[in-house]
Amino acid sequence: MIAVNLSDEDRWKKYNNFSPLVSIFKKFHPLNEEIERRINQHTFPISYKKNKYLVSPVDRNKFLFLIVKGVVRGFIKDGDNEITTWIAKENEVVGTIRNLWVDGDSEEYLQALEDVDLVAIPHVLSEYLYENFPEANIVGRKMMEVYYRSAEERAYLCRISSAEKRYKRFLVSFPDLINRVSLKHIASFLAIRLETLSRIRAKI
């Protein structure tokens, strides 16, 4: 396990003395005291300023991140172009999915679009919980169902032929992001030119 040079009490003092990840997991299934203890012990809070990278391809990422405050995007590069593949906000867990729990490189970048507060979740902790606690597997399965539906929605958005219809679908599917994310990132996410998106917004 990865240790942090803070006591559990000091580490989580601003969060009522326990990791916010515990509350997220409990929404999916009750947890026993040992799971809560290990989460409190082996996760830790971390913050990034707006526009900073949480992860880039030069990193060998060993964490997932629970977003406690702020917005994060994932993107890849195609030459000089940045292609936004997802945008996430509070209470969502993010990471470089292409090498999740697998040793290997990833082309993904994770970038803070606002000042963000996060909980870092070591991959080794996830693996330990899955291997030793049936409850963790139930939580993991239910969380994966949520994120699979979100991924399916993103895939559907990409396949809508009309740029205007894609934007209207975005407004329905992600209404709380429209005023928090720059238009250039929304345009990239929707595979629309920024000028086209501006015209659509002016029209509707």
Image (tube, rainbow, N blue to C red):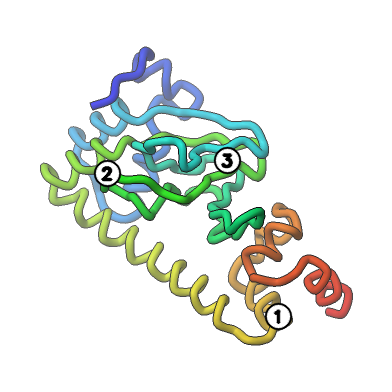
Name the spot of residue 133 as percent of width and height, x first: 13, 45
Q: Residue at x 65, y 45 (%)?
A: 113
For mark 2, give the secondary structure. loop
Q: Which residue is mark 1?
A: 163
Identify which amino acid the numbered label 2 is placed on.
Asp
Number of numbered discs: 3
Identify which amino acid the numbered label 1 is placed on.
Ala
Name the spot of residue 49 as percent of width and height, x first: 64, 32
Q: Is residue 86 left or right of residue 119?
A: right
Q: Which residue is mark 2?
A: 103
Q: Which residue is mark 3?
A: 69
For mark 1, give the secondary structure. helix
Q: Residue at x 36, y 13 (%)?
A: 5
Name the spot of residue 39 as percent of width and height, x first: 29, 33
Disc 2 from disc 1: Cα separation: 37 Å
**Quarter of the figure that contains the C terminus:** bottom right
Residue nearest the viewer, comparing 77 with 11:
77
Disc 3 from disc 1: Cα separation: 30 Å
Task: Say which label, 2 or 1, has the lower sequence index.
Answer: 2
**Quarter of the figure that contains the N terminus:** top left
Task: Say which label, 3 or 1, has the lower sequence index.
Answer: 3
Identify which amino acid the numbered label 3 is placed on.
Lys
